Image: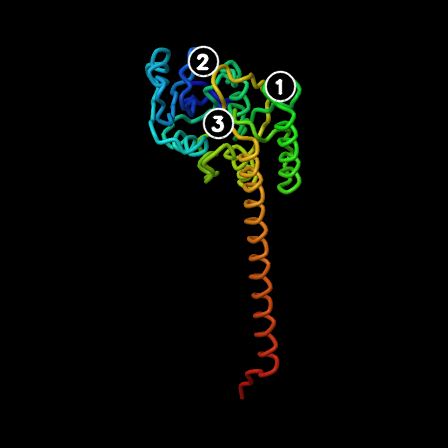
Amino acid sequence: MSLMNRLNQMKKISVVVPTMNESKNIKEVFPNIPDFVDEIVVVDGNSTDGTREEIKKYRKDTKIIIEQPSGKGSAMKTGFEMATGDLIIMMDADGSHDPAEIPSLLDPILDGFDVAKGSRLLPGGGSADFTPFRRMGNKIFVSMVNFLYDTNYSDLCYGYRAFKKEALDKINCSSNGFEIETEQSILMKKAGLKIKEVPSFEAKRKNGNSNLNSIRDGFKILNVIMKEYLKTFYAINKKKQHIISYDNKVNSDSRRMNTHPNHRS
C-alpha cells in the first residue's frame, strides 16, 4: 500500500536499513514497520548471528543485500541504489529509531519538502542515549555547519531521515562511515533542497554494542565539514580568478584597439 501526496499522486515507500549482527534487535524493529511501507531494503554486513533469518521471520518480502562490512555510509549508498520507492526512509536496526515515527517523517515529504530530517533537539524530540560527550560534540559540529554553510539545523549526527528519490540523486555522498549523516546534511544545503526538521526520540540500543567510536568518528565528521567547505572555497576562488582573467583580457583587447585603430581610406 502506497501513500498519496498533496497532489493526489500515489507514492511508493521504501525503508533502507543497514545491519550487522543485529539478530537480537530485529524483533524490536521489523514487526513495527507500518504496513503502508511497500519495500524494505536491508544491506547486511555479512552477519554471522542469524540476523537475516530473523528478519525473514517478520518480513518475508524484505530485499536483503549481503556485502562485506565497510561502514554505515557504504551500506546506505548500496541501499539507496537498490531502493525503488519514490520516498525513501533511512533508519537503524538497533531499536533506537521508533518505526511509529515513520508517518511524521513522511508528512513533510508528502507536503512538498525534499527531505525530512529527524532531530533529537527539537521540542518533542529527545534521546536516552546522548552521553554528555556526544551531546557536546554534536553541538560543536552543528554550530560549525550552521556557520559555514548558512544552515539552521538543530541536530546533525542523527540518521533517521526521509527523502524524495530525486533528492537523493542530487546528493552523491562518498562517506563510508557514520559521517554519512553530516555529509548528507551539508550536500542537501549545497544542492538547494527543501529541508524540514521533525522531532524524533532516540531510544537506547536494545541489545549489543554500537560500532560508533566517538573520538574516531568525531574526527571523520570534522574532516567532512572542512573538506566540503574547502571545496566551496576553492570553487568560488576559481570562479573569481576566471572572471578577473576574462576582464583583464577584455581590457587588454580594448586598449590595443584604441592604440592601433583600423582606419579605412
Query: Label 3: how many residues lie within 10 Å, few (<14), some (14-19) or many (20+)?
Result: few
Report the residue at 34% width, 19% height from top. 52
Where's residue 250, x and y in %? 58, 70
- State the image coordinates of residue 175 (x, y, percent, origin top left): 47, 38
Task: Look at the numbered discs 2 and 3 and tell me whether their residues touch, using CB distance below 8 Å.
Answer: no
Disc 2 marks which amino acid?
Pro
> Which disc, if any, is residue 125?
1
Label 1 sits on a secondary structure element that is: loop
The circle on residue 42 is none
**Which quarter of the image is occupied by the C terminus?**
bottom right
On screen, 40 above or below 149? above
Give the side of residue 168 with respect to residue 251, left or right: left
Q: Residue at x 56, y 57 (%)?
A: 238
**Label at residue 34:** 2
Q: Outermost residue toward the bottom?
A: 265
Looking at the rendered image, the disc whose residue lies closer to the viewer, 2 or 3, is: 3
* Quadrant containing the N terminus in the rendered view: top left
* Residue sitting at x 56%, y 53%: 234
Q: Is residue 87 above or below residue 256?
A: above
Tell me the distance, in whole angstroms, between the alpha carbons under discs 3 and 1: 24 Å
Question: Which class describes the residues within 10 Å of circle 1: few (<14), some (14-19), or many (20+)?
Answer: some
- SS assignment at label 3: loop
- Res 103 visible: no
For the residues carrying marks 2 and 1, which lies nearer the camera in this image?
1
Q: Residue at x 42, y 34 (%)?
A: 74
Asked whether residue 70 appears in the rendered view, the answer is yes
